[in-house]
């Protein structure tokens, strides 16, 4: 009789520890999903800061974006530069001075506010402030810089 009782106690202990392990692993998996999203957002923030000094977008200054280059890159992006960056969304927005026009094209440039290079809808876009410079041919030609923000959203791994 005592052997049978001991067997029941051991089975009950095994079931209890199995249930505790199930709860622990379900909580841990839930935390991993949150950590993965957090790491993705941090990666997007770092990429947004790094794009200001990317040679494809960089102007004459060390940490500014040449808006003229970015506009040309947008036109060639779908064909020639599609796999250049592993991001799902990349946009440059003028913050100051604000313009009422929305998306930048050759027709409304420079009277526009947003230039979308890669248009995807994965995750939350993270941003960083940058200088946006462009060449103005008036009065002998000069470089005009404005305040902007670059937005990046990374692809899901």
Image (tube, rainbow, N blue to C red):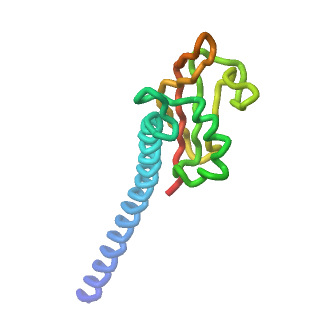
Where is 140 relative to 69, above or below?
above
- Residue 52 location, x and y as percent? 46, 34
* Left or right of residue 20, residue 54 in this image: right
Q: In the current view of this chain or complex, which residue is farthest to the left?
A: 2
Q: In the current view of this chain or complex, which residue is farthest to the right?
A: 107
Frontmost residue, 67 versus 92: 67
* Left or right of residue 156, residue 72 in this image: right
Where is 129 relative to 30, above or below?
above
Taking the spot 46% from the left edge, 54% from the top edge, the residue there is 33
Taking the spot 46% from the left edge, 40% from the top edge, the residue there is 55
Where is 9 relative to 73, above or below?
below
Frontmost residue, 103 versus 40: 103
- Residue 96 location, x and y as percent? 57, 16
Report the number of numbered marks.
0
- Residue 155 location, x and y as percent? 54, 52
Q: In the current view of this chain or complex, which residue is farthest to the front?
A: 140
Taking the spot 53% from the left edge, 40% from the top edge, the residue there is 152
* Left or right of residue 103, residue 135 in this image: left
Taking the spot 59% from the left edge, 28% from the top edge, the residue there is 93
- Residue 103 location, x and y as percent? 70, 30
Q: Quadrant of residue 136?
A: top right
Q: Quadrant of the N terminus?
A: bottom left
């Amino acid at each position: 009789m005592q052997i049978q009782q001991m067997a029941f106690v051991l089975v009950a202990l095994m079931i209890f520890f199995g249930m505790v392990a199930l709860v622990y692993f379900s909580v841990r998996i839930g935390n991993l999903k949150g950590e993965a999203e957090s790491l993705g957002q941090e990666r997007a923030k770092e990429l947004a800061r790094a794009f200001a000094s990317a040679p494809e977008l960089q102007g004459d200054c060390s940490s500014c974006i040449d808006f003229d280059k970015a506009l040309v890159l947008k036109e060639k992006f779908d064909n020639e530069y599609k796999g250049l960056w592993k991001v799902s969304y990349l946009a440059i927005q003028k913050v100051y001075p604000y313009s009422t026009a929305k998306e930048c094209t050759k027709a409304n440039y420079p009277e526009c506010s947003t230039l979308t290079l890669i248009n995807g809808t994965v995750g939350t876009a993270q941003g960083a402030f940058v200088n946006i410079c462009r060449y103005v041919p008036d009065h002998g030609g000069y470089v005009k810089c404005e305040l902007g923000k670059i937005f990046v959203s990374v692809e899901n791994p």
